[in-house]
Each structure stands twice: as structure tokens, then as C-alpha cells.
Amino acid sequence: MRKPVVLITGAGGEIGHGLIERLAARRERAIVTIDLARLDATMAPNVDREVTGSILDRGLLERVLAEFEVDLIFHLAALLSTRSEFTPVTAHQVNVEGTLTLLEFAQHEGESHGRPVTFVYPSSVAAYGLPDLETKRATAKVKEDEWLQPTTMYGCNKLACELMGRYYARYYKQLAAEPSSGRVDFRAARFPGLISAMTMPSGGTSDYAPEMIHAAARGEPYACFVRPDTRIPFMAMPDGIDALLQLAAARRDTLRRTAYNVGAFSPTADEIRTVVLEAFPRAEITWQTDRKRQGIVDSWPADVDDSAARRDWGFAPRYDFARAFSEYLIPMIRKRYA
Ligand code: SER
């Protein structure tokens, strides 16, 4: 008999790094990964099957389907927000068509083994679009159903995928009078900017926070591409991984939504600079606003209301702003560049 496996797409990215380590330590399921590039040498030993290729390659997905019984998917593959603005059509293809292909794949898997496949999806605060700074300042914490008018291609993609996931979870095949309302148990967490001590993001717009910290630790000057007063929510990577694992493990009947806000702390860029300078007093951090990237973060909320996630599946981040720096980022980053 085929054993259930977990499939992770975009496994070589920042979330994949942390997630694979945690899943491998649990030893509950074999781990199958898909990424365009080979995984780095530290990750590969934790993975049972590493598939190199594109999620847009249906043949490749069919081969995975034939070989493994996938009952849990973490669909992480995506182009991030700044990069998506440069190549919007490719962003749509990877972010939306790729997700649709995976949802169909999950539906087939679910049909073939008779129970729903849990499909965990990292959405983003980019799904929101506040019209101007005045509105952003007047909106303390956005709720899931407010201000869903994203201004970026990436935000449109994330919102579209949340809606497609909800469709597959609730409505797919209902018209065909199937007894079940779909074989895909779709669950999305709308993440703030994630900051990892271990990896660097590429192509995101919240990248100024991790870039500032990593540059300081490496002794390199850094020009921050947003204004000092810019405020968006952030989260330390270990809390992001916990959130995905907790959401994946939550009992279906406790989930009242398919997409949940998750937040942790919400500093301004200047507040981040201050704590980085306390830890690395010789750091050189200056300001050089990039108009387009500033426009993107100005449309993202200053903070999110994550009470639904706390209520329905017990989301509770361990790291607030102070602890994220003092107990995770600074010590781990120091170690990394020592
Ligand atoms: N952090 C991501 C980005 O900046 C948003 O999900 O693109």
C-alpha cells in the first residue's frame, strides 16, 4: 500500500527551509518536494523525494500522483510582490495557474483515495489594498473581509487563489450533485512580512526588514527603500511555520473560514532600524525611498486583526517585536555570520 506523503511546492524558498526541518523532525509522513532548483545541501537529507521542475508541468504532477498518496499539500511556490510587478503575466501564470493546477491535482488525489486532501496555502497581507495613507492610518487592524482591493499583481493573485481554494473546498462539483462538497480541504493563512534569521527573501516588498538586519550583521551598509514611518505587520519565521502546522492540524469542524489573518508585531521601519542599531552599533542604515515599492507597502495594512485564527485554531505567536529580535533574530543571525 502507498503511504500518505506531504507534498511541498516551492520547497527551496524561505518558508520551505523551516517547514521541512520541522516536518522531518516529526517523522509523520514522507516528504516529497517540488522546486525549480535543486534544494540546498542542508535540506536535501530531510526529504524523501526531491522533484526538480515546474508546478506548471502537468506531466510531472501526474507522475507524482501516480507514485504517491498525497494527503497534505503545502503550496509555497510563488513569485513575490516586487518581482511580480516586473513580470505580471509570469506572476499570474505561476501564482494563479500554478495554484489552479495544484488544486485540480489535490481534487484528483482526494477522489482517488476517498478522503479530502488538506491544502495549506500561504496568502499575504498583499491581498489587501488600502486606497491612501489617510485610510491606512485610520484603520488600526484590518479584518479578513475588509479592504480587499489589492493594487499589485501579487495581491490580486493571492486573493484569486484564496477564492479558488474556497471554491474547491465548498462548491466544486456541487452542481454535479456529488455527495461531497469537494475533495480539497483548503486552508489559507494571510501572512505579514516574514523575517528569517536563516534565509534571505528575494523579490518581496517587505524585504527591507530582513535586508536591514542581515546587512547589519554582515557589516554592510544598507539603504532602506521605504520611508522611516512605514508600518506593516511582520512575524518571525518560527511563528510562521508554527502557524502553517497548526492550521494544517486543526479539526475541520473548528474552522469557520478558509482564509485567516495571522499577525505578530507591527513596527515602523524606523523602529526596526533602532533595534538593529542597538544590536549592531556600527551598522550604517540610511533611507532611499523607492517610489514604487513605497506605494506597495502604503497600500498594505498597518496591522491585522487575527482574532478569528486565535479563536478557531489557537494561533498564538511566541515572538512579539522585542522577543523576535532579542531571542531569535539577533542571536541566530550573529551565529550565522560569526
Ligand atoms: N512578504 C511578501 C512580499 O513582500 C508578501 O507576501 O512580497
Image: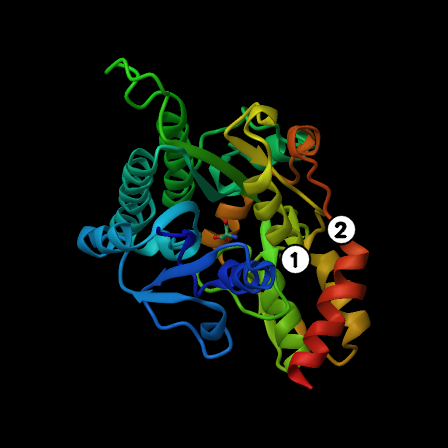
In this rendered view, identify the residue nearer to me: 223 or 6: 6
Indicate left or right for 209 with 277 as reference.
Answer: left
Disc 2 vs disc 1: Cβ atoms closer than 8 Å?
A: yes
Specify whether tag 2 is near ligand 1 (CB below 8 Å).
no
> In this orientation, does residue 300 appear?
no
Q: Answer above or below: position of 13 versus 59.
A: below
**Residue 44 against residue 138 in the figure, above or below:** below
- How many C-alpha atoms fall within 10 Å of the one at disc 2: few (<14), some, or many (≥20)? few
Q: Secondary structure at mark 2?
A: loop
Q: Is residue 27 left or right of residue 78?
A: right
Q: Which mark is residue 318?
A: 2
Real-space Cα separation, disc 2 to disc 1, in angstroms: 9 Å
Q: Indicate the amino acid at tag 2.
A: Arg
Front in this rendered view, residue 305 or 292: 305
- The yes-or-no answer for disc 1 within 8 Å of ligand 1 is no
Residue 224: percent from left, percent from top: 59, 64
Can residue 139 be seen here? Answer: yes
Is residue 59 toward the left or the right of residue 310 in the image?
left
The location of residue 261, given as percent across then percent down, is: 60, 36
Furthest residue toward bottom: 338
Residue kind at label 1, given as amino acid type: Pro
Residue that carries the numbered disc 1 in the rendered image: 238
Towards the viewer: 259 or 21: 21
Residue at 70% from the left image edge and 46% from the top image edge = 264
Q: Residues within 10 Å of mark 1 (few under 14, many from 20)?
A: many
| Comes first in the chain, label 2 or label 1 | 1
Identified at 76% across, 51% down, the residue is 318
